Image: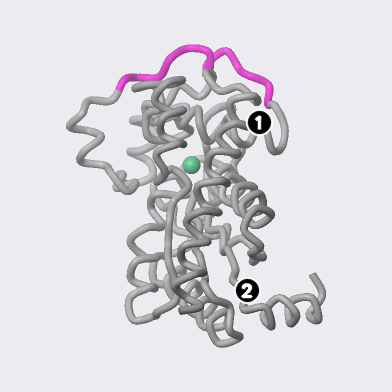
Amino acid sequence: MTWPEVEAHLARAGGVILPVGSTEQHGPMGLIGTDALCATVIAERAAELCGAVVAPTLALTPAPFNTAFPGTISISEPLFQALLGEVLDALLGQGFAPVYVLNGHGANLEPIGRALAGRSGVTVRSWWDFEPVNVLRRAWYGDWEGMHATPSEVAITMAAHRQPQIPDIARTPPRKLSPDYIAAHAGDRHGPPDQHRRDFPDGRVGSHSALATPAQGARLIGAAAHAVAADYATMARSASG
Ligand code: NI
């Protein structure tokens, strides 16, 4: 967009969706940018439905547990929190309402929560927060959704970007996670990088990525985009009072 287009959007009391992802390994067939790519494509589709604009994706975020895998770039939580805070202040200061943060990476949630404390007019959702999305994830993948390099996120990047070669290692199911493991590691609370790579050598954490198909990805994008657009519209109504 040009700045006059943004100015006209603000004159209509318009809001913005800010996608937030990560730059980290996503298993043997998932793209490194998966979390950023998922949040971005869903934000763009939702924006078409609800009249928002989309801010540049914040793709550099904390993923320290994945740094033993090549391609992962992790920044510290304090740096991410400070960066997000300044971006939010810029958007709020220019009058965007609402400012809707769309997240694609579990480890972002705590620092996002801290950045949002004390700033009004901002809301945060992850694209998997919505029941129509989870109905599809449960039906297609069940327990094989797992925790990382999930078939749902891989499906979304297949639909939005490209279908990767599926290496033999990805055709084999990963080690199944226990309910205790899942509970103890929610929000991506994983161990030190070397240990994490030893524990999950191909990068999948309980997720059978190869179940993903581009057609499923297209449906997940549609379900998430409609849910985000409806949620955004609710925020926009309350923002305009
Ligand atoms: Ni991910």
- Asked whether residue 111 is drawn in magenta, I would say no
Residue drawn at x 68%, y 21% as measured from the top left: 165
Disc 2 marks which amino acid? Gly
Quadrant position of the C terminus in the picture:
bottom left
**Disc 1 secondary structure class:** helix
View extreme (bottom): residue: 93
Q: Which residues are magenta?
A: 164-176
Cβ of mark 1 under 8 Å from ligand 1: the answer is: no
Residue drawn at x 35%, y 38% as measured from the top left: 196
- Asked whether residue 174 is drawn in magenta, I would say yes
The reply to whether dot 1 and dot 2 touch (C-beta < 8 Å) is no
The figure's colour scheme reads: one colour
Where is residue 37 shown, x and y percent of the image?
62, 47
Where is residue 139 shown, x and y percent of the image?
42, 21
The quarter of the picture where residue 179 lies is top left
Where is residue 54 shown, x and y percent of the image?
65, 63
**Disc 2 secondary structure class:** loop
Say whether residue 117 is left or right of residue 16.
left
Disc 1 marks which amino acid? Met
Say whether residue 18 is left or right of residue 75.
right
10 Å crowding of disc 2: few (<14), some (14-19), many (20+): many
Cβ of mark 2 under 8 Å from ligand 1: the answer is: no
Report the residue marked by disc 1. 158
Q: Main secondary structure of the magenta part?
A: loop
Q: Is residue 239 above or below residue 193?
A: below
Tell me the tag on residue 9: none
Q: Please report whichever mark, 1 or 2, sits nearer to the chain's N-terminal start.
A: 2
Say which of 188 and 139 sits in front: 139
Report the residue marked by disc 2. 14
